[in-house]
Amino acid sequence: MTHLLRSGFVAATGAALCLPLLAATTATAHEGHDDTPPPPPAGQFQKVTLNDRPGEPMDLAVLPDGDVLHTTRAGTIWHNDAQTGVNSIAGKIPVYLHDEEGLQSIALDPEYDGKSNKWIYLYYSPPLDTPADDPSTASINEGDAPENGTAADFEPYKGFLRVSKFRYSDGRVELGSEREVIDVPVDRGLCCHVGGDIVFDSAGNLILSTGDDTNPFQSDGFVPIDERADRNPAFDAQRTAANTNDLRGKILRITPRAGGGYTIPEGNLFAPGTAGTRPEIYSMGWRNPFRIEIDPDTDDLWVADYSPDARTANPDRGPAGHGKWAVVDEPGNYGWPYCATAELPYNDYDFETGTSGPKFDCAAPVNESPHNTGLRELPPVEQPEIWYTYGLSEEFPDLGTGGIGPMAGPAYQFDRRATTGKNPVAWPERYDDTPLFYEWTRDWVKGIHVDDGEVAAIEDVVPDIVTDNPVDMEFGPDGALYVLEYGDGYFAENPDAQLSRVDFVGPTGNHSPVPAIEAEPTAGKAPLTVSFSSDGTTDPDGDTRLRYAWDFDGNGTVDSRSPDPSHTYTRDGSYRATLTVTDRGGRRASADVDIVVGNQAPVVEFVTPVDGQAFAFGDTVAYEVTVSDDQQVDCSRVTVTYVLGHDTHGHPQTTTSGCTGSITTTVPEGHDPATEDLAAVFVAEYTDAGSEPALTDYAEVVLEPTG
C-alpha cells in the first residue's frame, strides 16, 4: 500500500501473512552443531506486518518491552507500540539529503532500560551550510560538487556524518538532549557509500562501520583510484579506505563518554600516538560495510561488504566484483581498494593515460596516492570467510546467483523463558548462535555455520517468507525476528516497504489474524466524519470469533470495538487510525490508515519523461513535474533526483529543484546496458507548506537504456 492520501477508500491489508515454508537445507553436523536437527516444516513461521508505510526505511532497534524504533533516510524516527500496534512519529531530525546521505543508523545504549538509562544513538548527516541547488538557475545545479577543479572548488562540499546520543522518553526522541560523540568526514555533492551501522560490544564500546565515500561510476566497474591532480578526490578510494589517517572505509571502535565525546579502548589497529594513523580504527580496507553485527558470546564482528560492479574479470584491471562476509576477530586490513580478497588483487591503473600497471601485492599493500595522509605501507590483507560474485560461486553454491548486496545479520540467542507463557513467538533452539546472512538483491536469508574459522554449512532460513530487499533485521527480547524491508523502489517510500516480525508459531500453535482496514473519506475539512470497515479481515486458523479494537487518533486508547465504526474528526491534523484484531487464543495483529484533516495531500506526477521511455546513458533528459494540491503550489519545493538503477537497487547521482528542468544521465563506465539490468530512475518529491500537517507525495519513472 502506498502512503498517498486521497479521497475514496484506502485499504491496508496483509498486516499478518501466513506463508508455508519449504523444507530448508539441513545444516551439516560440525563442532558445536553435531546434533543439528532438521529445520521446522512448512507453516510453522508467520510474518506479521507492523508498519506498511515506513517511509524510506533504513535501520531498526527493538526495545526491551518489544516496541520498535526505526528510521527513514529523510530523518524521521518511527515508533511501533507492541501493545497497541499504533505507529507514530517519535521524532524528526534535520538532515542533509544529497546523494545517499541522511539518517543512517539507530542503536540502543547497551545499558538502555527505558528508566534509568534512556539513551539511543543516531548516525546522521547534519545539514551544515553545504551548497544546494538553486531552482532559479536552471542550467546549474549548485548542489553537485564539481568533478574537476581545484581544492578551493571542492572545499565548500566538505562535511561530516555524526554519531550522537539522544534521550528517548515517553515515545519521543528529545532532540534537545543531543550529546555529540564522533564526526566522520565526508565529501558531499557526489555519490556514494556514506552509510554506516552501529553495534556495541560486551565492554560497552561503540563499533561503527563507515563506507569509503567514493564515486564508483567512472572506474569501469573496478577500483576507483583516480589520482589526477585536477580530479575531485572523491574519485580516489585510496584517500579513505586505504588511508590509515582517515575514518572512512573502516570499522571504528571507541568508548563513548557519558557527556559526549569518546576515549580510545585498548586493542585497536593502531596505538594512540602512532604517526599517520587514527587510533579509532579497528579494521580498514572496506568499501561499503552497510551492515555489521556482533557475536554476543565472543565479541567477534560479522561484517558484510558490498561489491564493485564489474561482471567479469579483466586481466588488466582485476577480478569481477565480489561481495564478502567476514568474521572479524582481531584488527586487520580487508584490502579495498587494492584487493577484493587476500587472493584476488586488482591492477594499478593510471587514469591519466588509461594504462594498467602490475597487480597490487595483497601481502604487503602500499598506498602511494597523493591523497593519502597516512602510512604508506599497510597491513597485509585478511581473507573473508565468504566471498562470491554475480555467477554461481564454486566455493559457496548455496548463495545462488544475481546481484551482490550482502548484509550481516544477527545470531539468535535462545532463551527458554521466551518460549513459555501464552502465544510465544520465540524461534526454536535449533537456531541458537547461528549468525544470519541476508541479501538485499537476492531477497533471501541464510544461516551460516562456522567451524574452526571455516564455513562448515550454509542453510536456508524461512525461505518462503518474503523479505523484499531486507535492509535490517534484529531478534527481539520475545525471540522473534524483526525485519525492515526497503522494497523494490528508489530513495522514496514504496508500496513494498514495511516493518515486520517473523514469529515461530510451531506445529500446533495459534497464528495471528490478518486484519484489513478501509476508510472513506481519508481527507477533508473539519468536521470530517469517516466510515471505517474491517471487511476482508481473516484468520489463518479459521477463527471467526474475532475481537476488534479501533484507535482513531493514535493515542493508544481504544475508541470503538465495532467491526465497522465511524468517527468524526473535529480538529485539523494527521491521524493514523489503527485497527487491532484479536482471535480467541489471544493472538493479535494491527493495520492502520492515515486520515488527514484540514489539508489534502499533494499529488505529484511526471509529464515527462514517461515510464519505460528509451534513452542512452549520457543523454540530457528534460523533465516536467505537475503538482496538484488544495493550496498554492511552490515549484521551488519540488525536487527531482536522478538515480542509477542497478539490479534491484540504485545510487542517486544528482538532485535538482523546480517543476521543470533537465538532468544529464551519468554514463556508467564498465557497465553494459545490453547485458546488465541498468536503468535511469527519476524520483520527484513535493512537500506542501502553509498548513498543518505538511504532507509529501512522490512520483517515480524508470527509463530503459537503448544499449
Image (cartoon, grey):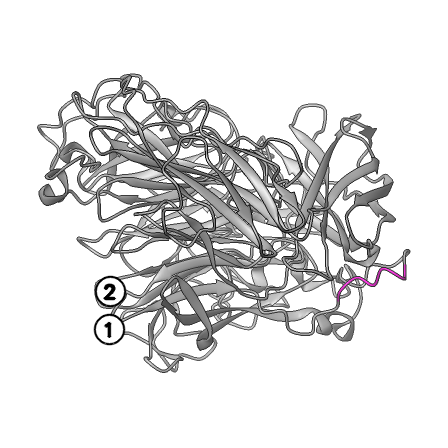
Label 1: which residue? 116
Callout 1 amino acid:
Ser
Please, what secondary structure does the residue beneath circle 2 have? loop
Classify 356 as above or below 379.
Answer: above
Q: Nearer the viewer, residue 165 or 33?
A: 165
Visible residue check, residue 547: yes
Residue at the spot 74% in from the left edge and 66% down from the top edge: 229
Where is residue 330, by image quadrant? bottom left
Q: Is residue 74 left or right of residue 556?
A: right
How packed mark 1 is, by other alpha carbons closer than 10 Å (few <14, some 14-19, many 20 or more), is few
Asked if residue 133 lies in the magenta stretch, the reply is yes
Q: Which residues are magenta?
A: 132-137
Residues tagged 2 and 1 counted as in contact (Cβ below 8 A): yes
Asked if residue 460 lies in the magenta stretch, the reply is no
Q: Nearer the viewer, residue 598 or 428?
A: 598
Distance Cα–Cα, label 2 vs label 1? 7 Å
List x then y, in percent, for residue 500: 39, 38
List x then y, in percent, for residue 495: 57, 34
Q: Which mark is residue 32?
A: none
Classify 325 as above or below 247.
Answer: above
List x then y, in percent, for residue 345: 50, 45
Classify 88 as above or below 259.
Answer: above
Q: Nearer the viewer, residue 7 or 277?
A: 7
Label 2: which residue? 113
Quadrant of the image for the C terminus?
A: top right
